[in-house]
Image (spheres, coloured by chain):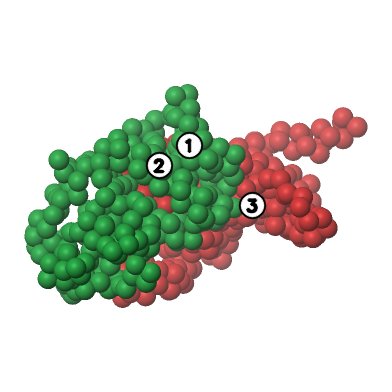
Amino acid sequence: MARLQLHDLQLARGGQTILEHLDGRFMDGAITALIGANGAGKSTLISAIMGMLSPVAGRVECRVTRERRAWLPQQLALDLTFPMSVEELIMTGTWPSHGALKGYCGPHYRRGREIMARLGISNLAHRPLGELSGGQRQRALLGRTLMQDAELLLLDEPFANVDTETVDVLMDVLRDMAKHGATIIVVLHDMEQLARLADEALLLAGGHGRWVKPDVLLDHHSGLVPRAPRLPLTFPDAPHAGTA
Amino acid sequence: MLALLDAWLIAPFDYGFMQRALVAGLALSLAAPPLGVFLMLRGMSLIGDAMAHAILPGVALGFLAAGFSLPMMSLGGILSGLLIAVLAGSVSQMTGHKEDSAMASFFLISLAAGVMLVSLGGSSVDLTHVLFGSILAVDPTALVLIAGISSLIVIILAVIFRTLVVECLDPLFLRGQGVRGGLVHGIFLGLVVLNLTAGFQTLGTLMAVGLMMLPATTARFWSQRLEGLIAIAIAIALVASTGGLLISYHLSLPSGPAIILLAGAGYLLSALFGRHHSLAARLRRRAMPLGTAEHH
């Protein structure tokens, strides 16, 4: 089953085509890595999946309601001077069920505390967001998507500027979410993280996309990550041509 | 002692005009500061000032059409405030110029147009009244209008509160949830215009902004939580409007400036001695030995 499918998708920004003839399905319960050089169209594709950019041709078929889609953009999008605590941020994840007016009650606060415990940020519950480190902030934001019961989760370089312990925690939680059926798409640059996390990968380059298994991107002789993965990746004629 | 306190604090309110002024001031003090807090947090502290100029031509037109009728002048003010906010928004969208430059242009035009219109139809006394208000001349009709508008503002703000908070923090999240952030922002600016219209009778179009912004900027020295900011700002506004009225009564000073100056004194004192980011707090922090965590 795939809740999210792309059908001959063509996307443009400012009259210039960024991606074309993009097909494929993002499997439910799988983590798909989105990779490509800067400007290859990763953010454009994410905007289209979130429904914020209309395709020039083709379509995005998404059977996840708007409220169950979550997008974790790169951290700069937040106004961190706004006085809000970690717990308050996580509670805003109840928006799909509570909207603008319904009050939070006991069970929801309990759920919020469970989520904070799982992410290891219980001690930060009342800390203002502006005082958090990059890693702590990223945990809090993932907490909000957990509260949201997101079925489709898009993350834009979630591990940039984040300490290794946080990376482990975030990866665990993402794996767990996928195990419970969520469709997860992660923009990644680090091949080692890709090897650890992703079930599938969508490579974007030269305006086209290609689906590959993550192990294709690894060095097949040693099974290790190539020491210096070069991006943009050029597509060999066959996916396995480079491994012989 | 008690007699003295009574003479200073209670007796002035035996007069009907002082009672009405007090109620009007308290009503405005409940509605204006929360709006000021949000304006401040969004980095739009000067927008209130700009909006105050924008309502002037409408107020003047209402004055020309119906004389000194508060409902007509308020209606005119609301309409011209909203019109100019929309105009400034669309000009900046059309030209790609920053919104503040479009707003600045429109507000200067409105100020000049408003002053011109008032002068056409009245004397300089009328002009002074519109520009600087007169809280002691609040009649029962005006009082009902002010209380009504203030209540409406508080109720609408309560309804959009969560949406507004999320929109300030993370507009993208709200958009993902299918809520149009622009709409919330528009409603909020509408409330600012409404509040200024309610305030101009008592404090004048220009000084009505004072009761909105000064308590908010002062509260920032005392709290770092949204609820705290709003509660402290309201408390400051309540004290300033009551205290300002008393000062103006006892010392025969104009009431509007007395209220705003009292709030201003609160701001300066807080900048020196407040809990957060004040001069005193900075000195305290410098004196703190390494390793002691600062508590919030």
Q: Secondary structure at mark 1?
A: helix
> Vertical placement of B257 versus B18: above or below?
below
Q: Alpha-carbon neighbours of circle 2 within 10 Å: few (<14), some, or many (≥20)?
A: some
Q: Secondary structure at mark 3?
A: loop
Callout 1 and callout 2 share a chain? yes
Image spot of residue A103 (x, y percent): 43, 29
In the rendered image, which residue does mark 3 sit on? B220
Label 1: chain? A
In the rendered image, which residue does mark 1 sit on? A118
> Vertical placement of A140 versus A223: above or below?
above
Image spot of residue A187 (x, y percent): 32, 59
Q: Front-most of A102 and A244? A: A244
Spot the green chain and give its letter.
Answer: A
Res. B84 image quadrant: bottom left
**Residue at (62%, 42%) from the top-left corner?**
B228
Q: Is residue B244 visible?
A: no
Q: Nearer the viewer, mark 1 or mark 3?
A: 1
In the rendered image, which residue does mark 2 sit on? A173
Spot the red chain and give its letter.
Answer: B
Q: Given contact means CB atoms under 8 Å apart, are the residues at marks 1 and 2 in contact?
A: yes
Amino acid on which disc 2 is placed: Val
Q: Given contact means CB atoms under 8 Å apart, are the residues at marks 3 and 2 in contact?
A: no
Q: Label 1 vs label 3: CA separation?
A: 33 Å
Q: Front-most of A174 and B247? A: A174
> Vertical placement of A180 versus B62: above or below?
above
Q: Front-most of B74 and B49? A: B49
Q: Nearer the viewer, mark 3 or mark 2?
A: 2
**Residue at (42%, 52%) from the top-left corner?**
B170
